[in-house]
């Protein structure tokens, strides 16, 4: 039995079996020891990759022969010959059998050795073949990945996905009936993998050191999404303890459910609006069930991340109309696509950015890809004919970005008018406050926007200069830092003075203690993952706004986040012990 620690990002307990997702970089370089019993399976993987590569090369040979003639196509026959050559197959197979290593390592090291021999050969004919050999090694490695994709499609129930890192699209793409939890070696508390795991209601732990050297396929694992730890090969006693913990968690969730039905009113009678964050239309049902009165953040970039091709206007329109239909008159806040940073399909980008969090992301990306942006805006406007929709732009940093976005909306409206297409002429247009520049200038922005939505995930990252996805600096990622609280206070103040609503939709809003601070700082709308809504309601109903204001005022006055955190924790523990006992703050 072995316990590894990481960062808890999505609560819950799972007892399941490990499935390791290999990433390409690791496939290429990492040597992995194979259990003697798994050697035949590893040989089969190698054969699968080799035969799949030969079949691809046969196709290429045929196409090249048709298009360029038999002579030019000969190169592919050479490639096929290499893959069938016993002087190459034999050492690869022997290496898997004798050294009991993974097929990736056996292929790449054997091809490496041969490539070096070719490169050092005095005859230039050999030297000229070095690139072909490297290409052949890559082709087989790619096919080993395909082989892995096939096994991903056939996962067993209760599978725990273990990976170095997962892209949002990978996380969203797993079969939810089979995958029970995620564990990654990289990532921080608000990385998008964490967000998607929360949306899918699956426990997740990220930033687990030594994960990949310790976990292997088929191993028994316990994922503790509360404490942020995993246990490999747990003994029977530990399994039993976690079975009990699962039962208790189920009971707590059932007892919290009664709050879903009750209004979100503080003990001194202030109405708070509680909304849900979603990435997919299918989550709406759960938001409503958990007591949400609408959607405060729809992360529409997931329409891009979950498919290979760019969504059409119709794809957008269908998705938004579906949300409106399910919401039955409750409001839907659509955030225009927030691609970039860790929500790139980086491989789509021919030139990956050196520093993508400070790069062409969010509204900047949209303004640089106007066709994509306008397609989305038209679809949003068309869907607004069917129910209450608001639209907001992510990562606004200067007023010109907001004005340009709004100008595009006006232009699309004019076109729709000309075509006689219906839409909501009074659609509200707001912005996310996610960078300190926007928070500091909130007074100016407030004169032009219809609403603010504070995105603490990014606001914390940019205020404290801490990459939200980097597990090495995760302990520095502290939403309760007085600098962050001051920025939130200023945004709420600007909203009040200009009579525009201010909401908060970052992950920290799901934390009851942070939510209490938000109320104290003047925020009256909270949007969070659906599973957190019942607990938030319980917290709101147990507190008064005046008390929250006093706590927030004091928290903001501390010099450090540590002092602010322990003060808030001790106050809230006294006020609502049933919520805060044993719960860390910030
Ligand atoms: C945020 O930054 O707080 C936010 C809600 O946006 P995202 O997490 O999608 O970047
Ligand atoms: Mg953000």
Image (tube, rainbow, N blue to C red):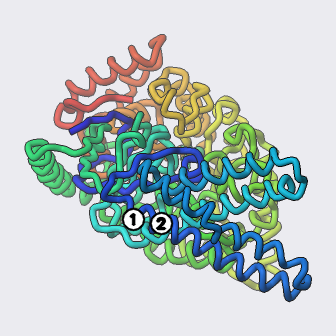
Q: What SS does tag 1 mark?
A: helix
Furthest residue toward top: 559
- Measured Cα–Cα span from mark 1 to mark 2: 6 Å
Residue 520 relative to residue 246: left or right: right
Image: 149 above or below 59: above
Q: Quadrant of the C terminus?
A: top left
Q: Residue 445, how many percent across, how many down?
A: 71, 40
Q: Nearer the viewer, residue 96 or 314?
A: 96
Q: Nearer the viewer, residue 540 or 352?
A: 352
Residue 266 relative to residue 392: left or right: left
Question: How many discs mark residues in the rendered view?
Answer: 2
Q: What SS does tag 2 mark?
A: helix
Q: Quadrant of the N terminus?
A: top left
> Does the beta carbon at disc 1 come under 8 Å from ligand 1?
no
User: Which of the 4 image quadrants contains residue 138?
Assistant: bottom right
Q: Which residue is mark 1?
A: 41
Residues at marks 1 and 2 touching, judged by CB atoms closer than 8 Å: yes
Instruction: Tell me if residue 110 can be seen.
Output: yes
Image: 353 above or below 368: above
Image: 207 above or below 110: above
> Going 56% across and 38% down the picture, which residue do you hit?
496
> Going 72% across and 56% down the picture, which residue do you hit?
134
Q: Residue 395, how many percent across, how many down?
A: 67, 44
Dot 1, crowdedness within 10 Å: few (<14), some or many (≥20)? few
**Rendered-image quarter of ligand 2:** top right
Q: Nearer the viewer, residue 303 or 60?
A: 60
Dot 2, crowdedness within 10 Å: few (<14), some or many (≥20)? many
Q: Residue 234, how many percent across, how many down?
A: 18, 44
Image: 50 above or below 347: below
Q: Which residue is mark 2?
A: 45
């Amino acid at each position: 039995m072995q316990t590894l620690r990481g960062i808890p990002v999505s609560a819950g307990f799972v007892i399941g079996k490990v499935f390791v997702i290999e990433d390409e970089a690791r496939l290429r370089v990492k040597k992995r020891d194979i259990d003697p019993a798994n050697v035949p399976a590893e040989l089969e993987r190698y054969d699968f990759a080799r035969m799949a590569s030969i079949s691809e090369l046969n196709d290429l040979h045929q196409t090249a022969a048709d298009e360029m003639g038999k002579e030019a196509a000969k190169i592919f026959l050479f490639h096929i010959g290499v893959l069938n050559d016993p002087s190459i197959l034999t050492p690869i197979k022997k290496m898997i059998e004798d050294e009991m290593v993974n097929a990736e390592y056996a292929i790449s090291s054997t091809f490496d050795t041969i490539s070096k021999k070719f490169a050092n050969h005095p005859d230039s004919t050999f030297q000229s073949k070095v690139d072909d050999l490297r290409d052949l090694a890559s082709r087989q490695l790619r096919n080993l990945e395909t082989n892995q994709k096939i096994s991903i499609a056939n996962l067993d129930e209760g599978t725990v996905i273990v990976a170095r890192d997962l892209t949002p699209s990978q996380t969203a793409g797993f079969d939810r009936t089979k995958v029970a939890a995620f564990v990654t070696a990289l990532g921080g508390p608000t990385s998008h993998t964490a967000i998607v795991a929360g949306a899918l209601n699956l426990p997740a732990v990220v930033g687990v050191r030594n994960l990949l050297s310790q976990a292997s396929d088929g191993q028994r694992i316990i994922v503790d999404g509360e404490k942020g730890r995993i246990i490999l090969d747990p003994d029977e006693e530990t399994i039993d303890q976690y079975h009990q913990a699962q039962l208790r968690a189920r009971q707590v969730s059932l007892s919290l459910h009664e709050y879903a039905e009750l209004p979100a009113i503080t003990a001194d009678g202030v109405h708070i609006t509680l909304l849900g964050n979603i990435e997919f239309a299918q989550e709406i049902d759960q938001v409503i069930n958990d007591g949400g009165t609408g959607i405060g953040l729809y992360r529409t970039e997931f329409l891009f991340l979950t498919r290979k091709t760019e969504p059409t206007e119709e794809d957008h329109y269908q998705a938004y109309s579906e949300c409106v239909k399910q919401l039955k008159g409750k409001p839907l806040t659509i955030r225009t696509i927030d691609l970039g940073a860790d929500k790139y399909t980086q491989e789509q980008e021919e030139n990956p950015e050196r520093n993508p969090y400070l790069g062409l992301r969010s509204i900047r990306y949209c303004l640089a890809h106007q066709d994509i942006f306008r397609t989305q805006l038209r679809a949003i406007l068309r869907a607004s004919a069917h129910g209450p929709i608001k639209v907001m732009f992510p990562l606004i940093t200067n007023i010109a970005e907001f004005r340009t976005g709004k100008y595009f909306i006006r232009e699309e409206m004019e076109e729709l008018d000309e075509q006689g297409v219906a839409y909501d002429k009074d659609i509200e247009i707001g912005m996310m406050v996610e960078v300190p520049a926007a928070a500091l200038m909130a007074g100016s922005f407030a004169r032009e926007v219809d609403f603010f939505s504070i995105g603490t995930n990014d606001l914390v990252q940019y205020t404290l200069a801490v990459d939200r996805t980097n597990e090495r600096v995760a302990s520095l990622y502290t939403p309760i830092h007085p600098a962050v609280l001051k920025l939130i206070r200023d945004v709420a103040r600007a909203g009040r003075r200009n009579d525009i609503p201010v909401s908060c939709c970052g992950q920290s809003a799901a934390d009851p203690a942070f939510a209490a601070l938000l109320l104290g700082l003047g925020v009256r709308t909270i949007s969070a993952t659906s599973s957190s809504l019942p607990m938030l309601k319980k917290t709101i109903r147990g507190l008064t706004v005046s008390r929250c204001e006093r706590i927030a005022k004091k928290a903001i006055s501390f010099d450090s986040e540590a002092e602010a955190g322990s003060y808030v924790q001790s106050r809230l523990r006294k006020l609502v012990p049933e919520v805060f006992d044993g719960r860390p703050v910030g």
